[in-house]
Image (cartoon, rainbow, N blue to C red):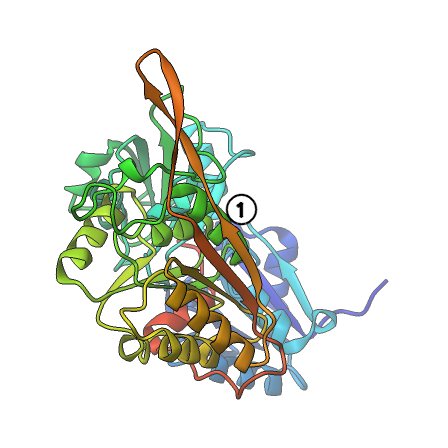
Amino acid sequence: MSARRAVTVVGLGDDGCASLSSRAASAVARAEVLVGGERHLEFFPQFRGEKIALKGGLPAVLERVERLSAEQNVCILASGDPLFFGIGALVVKKLGAEHVEIIPSLSSVQWAFARTGIAWDDAAFVSVHGRSPEGFATRLRRLSKVAVLTDRENGPARLAARLLEHGDAGWRAWVCERLAGAGERVRAFELDALAACDDIGPLNVLLLLRSDPAWRPPPQVPYLHEDAFAKRMPKNGLITKREVRTLSIAAMALRPDAVVWDIGAGSGSVSIEAAMLCPLGRVYAVEVDPEGVEICRDNVRAHGVDNVRVVAGRAPEALAALEAPDAVFVGGSKGSMEEILATALDRLRPGGRLVVNAITLENVAEAYRVLKARGLDPEVTLLSVSRGVPLARYTRYEALNPIHIFAATKPAEAGAADPPAPPEAKGARGAKPSPEAS
């Protein structure tokens, strides 16, 4: 039999002691130190050992737990399953798996699906507890059944309003409050009614199901025609054509959590498609023209992506405050190609990708010269596309402007260390664990 571990993390529900298994109850009984949220500690008024509330900074509490566990039995109380958006992973990382025992209870998500009678083997799980809601609508674009862990700031009503703002109204919602507790309440909503609801408690799980049984997820590769975007006059100007856009985005080698700069965003077509492919990341659409900025914002809302930040300003000056990117797309330079490429390469994360679209011979020559001067050997593609268009009863070809696509990878050893991300951006990439609301 393996040796008992120094720290035990016990999950419990909103019914407190009643939710404990005999094994979990024994762990609490033999503990000399009991750690947990104030709500959890109140379930054990009879405990005579030392109590430590989880407040005032989790790292400091875990440091103390590590010191105490050398001499005493420590039990940490958590909601539901401590390894499901909970504190369990942090405790294991801090103390080592060999020193920690996890005793889970039913998670709030399990209770929510049980109370609504909805199967959850095909559900996705999203937490906005202690996290920014940015990207919430984008993440849900390809999902049909979602359980959402919320908090006081990002409650069900606010999340419903966010989905409606981004044109995604096709959901049926259930709000499950204080699950397994004395004040348990489960209610079904249409999304517009939920957005207007103002009597939802902070301890809840939000379930979302697509209301249309015929709904299917959008294509993996967007490949949107230019006519799908509002744009400035002339009718077909200032927008990257979809064939060029597809190759350019593929050349950026995007990951789901990538941070992307789209410089000279124009109508925002590259930003929007990149955001669809990076639901856990962010895209900064940098545009100097005031009319283009408003059109870009309109297109972002119209296509339901909420992880695009439209930045009004001229590059490279407008890039200074942005977090370091994993990929940079340059679609317009306003005569500052050399300065933009220099800034992009300096700020690009090691291993990141830089992609440049160049139409004029001058821009082609300048982009190639700058990249070579930085010791890069860019991939160069000359793309000429002709589309079939009707001609009476026939079809003829109509050529689009040829375009050069430059692509280069920043070497891992190139450049100095990247500057830290702005505080508002850090949480989205490495958000703190969010104890589930049970």
17 horizontally vs 377: left or right = left
Q: Residue furthest right?
A: 1
State whether residue 334 is above or below residue 220. Answer: below
Residue 150: percent from left, percent from top: 34, 53
Q: Position of residue 289 (x, y in %)?
A: 17, 63
Q: Nearer the viewer, residue 379 or 229?
A: 379
* Residue depicted at 47% across the width and 57% down the height: 404
Residue 113 position by quadrant: top left
Is residue 10 something one can see in this rendering? yes
Residues packed near mark 1 inside 10 Å, few (<14), some (14 to 19) or many (20 plus)? some
343 and 128: which is toward the camera: 343
Spot occupied by residue 345 in the image (x, y as percentages of width and height): 47, 77
Q: Viewer-proximal residue, 306 or 412?
A: 412
Horizontal and vertical percent for residue 218? 43, 33
How many numbered badges does the structure rendering display? 1
Q: Secondary structure at mark 1?
A: loop
Residue at the image point whose x is 35% and y is 77% from the top: 423
Q: Quadrant of residue 184?
A: top left
Q: Is residue 20 left or right of residue 160?
A: right
| Residue tagged 1 | 106
Amino acid residing under circle 1: Leu
The residue shown at (74%, 71%) is: 98
